[in-house]
Image (cartoon, helix red, strand yellow):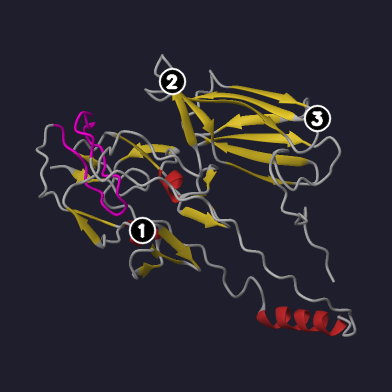
Amino acid sequence: MAEKCVHKGCGKLYSDPEEVCNYHPGPPVFHEGQKGWKCCKPRVLTFDEFLEIPPCTQGKHSTTDLPPEIEKKTAEEVPADAASQSLASKLSEVPTDLPTRAPLAPQPAPTAPPPPPESEDDEPSLDIPDGKECRRKGCHATYKKGQTRSDEEQCVHHPGFPIFHEGSKGYSCCKRRVLEFDQFMKLEGCKTSPRHLFIGSGQDKKKGGGSSGQTQSGGEELLETVRHDFYQTPTTVIASFFLKKIDKDAAAVGFEEKGLVLDLITSDAAPKRYKTTVPLFGTIDTAKSTFKILGTKLEVSLCKADGASWPVLRSDERTTGEILQIGRAGRV
């Protein structure tokens, strides 16, 4: 009788206890918008990308493993009396006649364009792989090769998006909230559809404004743009270009003084290609700039030639006028 593995990142049905299990031994980590696993380094921004981080450990399937205990600091590590006395002494030293200024008016954050709507039906002309899991959140049904499809499948899922706020976890479409990640993954859906959605139209959703161009004669899809993001230190700009399954052997990345030359092709059956030259806001040291290809993105480290702050990554992007602070704030 087939049993379901409880290892994080696996969750497969298995009948052979000696079968190799690929999983994450550590707990999930959600910090300042980034998502990943404590046991390995990849960090992503969206929940869908988090679910697709490849497992980092091999072992044997299990139905009994418990999640690791949450590390808790004891009161002995920081004496309460000493901490309160130290804080009180520091507060007493702060001068009371410091000049004040009016608070800055908050600026509304730019809203990202909504993603294209998900197809509600599987394309009948496409084959569904055996063991393919339903794409809808909260429904973990898997397809068995040759099974009959009908409107009696009853797909129970969450149509909303995941919400993680102050330790609680849930979905925007319903009010249930839990504390543990394992409990969140088991939250029963709040909407029922007549059929499961295993492959949809057969095309992945374009995330973060990514758009596709023309399809080449060899079946290669040329992308016009992909989602990008960046942050910086006093000496370096770290930029990410989000594209899944980049072929490391075929990819080409070139550095120019004020440009970044990219030729990225994926290893999909119908490969996607992103070929462009990115005009950079500032000048870089090409000899000290580096890059690395991860499972969901290309990450480049651009060494600043002059140490100036970059308000934007691309020189053709409109600046907002805000001042970016680099490093730690000074103490009063």
Nearer the camera: disc 3 or disc 1: 1
The Cα atoms of the two marked residues, 2 and 1, are separated by 33 Å
Nearer the camera: disc 2 or disc 3: 2
Question: Residue visible at 19% across and 45% down?
Answer: 3
The Cα atoms of the two marked residues, 3 and 1, are separated by 45 Å
Q: Position of residue 191 (x, y in %)?
A: 24, 60
Which amino acid type corresponds to the residue marked 1 in the rendered image? Gly
Checking the image for residue 285, the label placed there is 3
How many other residues sit within 10 Å of disc 1, few (<14), some (14-19) or many (≥20)?
some
> Start and end of the magenta stretch?
122-145
Could you say which is closer to the camera, residue 252 or residue 119?
119
Which amino acid type corresponds to the residue marked 3 in the rendered image? Asp
Decide which of tag 3 and tag 1 comes sooner along the chain: 1
Residue holding disc 2: 220
The Cα atoms of the two marked residues, 2 and 3, are separated by 33 Å
Q: Quadrant of residue 160?
A: bottom left
Observer able to see residue 37: no
Question: Residue visible at 22% across and 32% down?
Answer: 128
- In contact (CB < 8 Å): disc 3 and disc 1: no
